[in-house]
Amino acid sequence: MMFNLVVFNLAWFGLVYWGNTFIPFSLLLLSAHLYFIAKVPSELWLILSITVIGIFIDSLFQYSTVFIFANSNHIPFWLMVLWACFGATICHSLQFLAKSKVLQLLVGALFAPLSYMAGYKFEVVDFSLSPLITYLILSFIWAWLFVLFFALKDKLVNVEVSHV
């Protein structure tokens, strides 16, 4: 669990700081996760589902100009990979949230938007709205995303574990 958290933070920092250059290393870390840590094959489907949802949500923010990525008509590839790396945390380092929807809502609302605020400070994303308004919008979305991601985990991963 601690290893998963450390690897995710390494991927997050590398992708935000070095961008697309860090993608191969992050994909190597994600592959190692899937090979050595993933408990069931369906965890890959969970990671892919979260990645698709995340890319869709961030693309909506980008197309509505809430997020502004310099010189890009789409969200950066490094952000797409970051979504996959985040998906790998749901069954492991974020597992403590699995039994409480209240915790999922709170952690999603309070802490997940901080990642975007850090990206803003690193100047890899800009906001068309004030940072406070953007944070509040992200808080609302992320609260429900956490609930959705853990519901997906229950459907995709827990079902397979109970049949093993």
Image (tube, grey):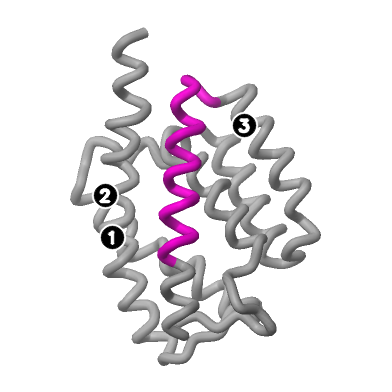
From where the camera sits, is residue 66 visible?
A: yes
Magenta span covers which residues? 38-57
Which residue lies at the image location 41% right of the left edge and 65% below the top edge?
57
Q: Is residue 158 above or below residue 70?
A: above
From where the camera sits, is residue 121 visible?
A: no
Residue 43 magenta-highlighted: yes
Name which quarter of the figure residue 124 lies in: bottom right
Q: Is residue 112 left or right of residue 86?
A: left
Residue under numbered circle 1: 143
Residue under numbered circle 3: 33
Which residue lies at the image location 31% right of the left edge and 41% below the top edge?
150
Query: Please, what secondary structure does the residue beneath circle 2 have?
Result: helix
Residue under numbered circle 2: 147
Q: Is residue 8 above or below residue 61?
A: above
Q: How many marks?
A: 3
Q: Do tag 1 and tag 2 residues touch (Cβ < 8 Å)?
A: yes
Question: Which residue is most to the right?
Answer: 21
Residue 130 x, y percent position in the rendering: 42, 91
Mark 1 surroundings: few (<14), some (14-19) or many (≥20) residues within 10 A: many
Q: What's the distance in space between the residues labelled 3 and 2, CA to CA? A: 23 Å
Q: Do tag 3 and tag 2 residues touch (Cβ < 8 Å)?
A: no
Residue 140 x, y percent position in the rendering: 27, 69
Query: Please, what secondary structure does the residue beneath circle 3 have?
Result: helix
Mark 3 surroundings: few (<14), some (14-19) or many (≥20) residues within 10 A: some
Mark 2 surroundings: few (<14), some (14-19) or many (≥20) residues within 10 A: many
Which residue lies at the image location 37% right of the left edge and 85% below the top edge?
132
Q: Amino acid at mark 1?
A: Ala
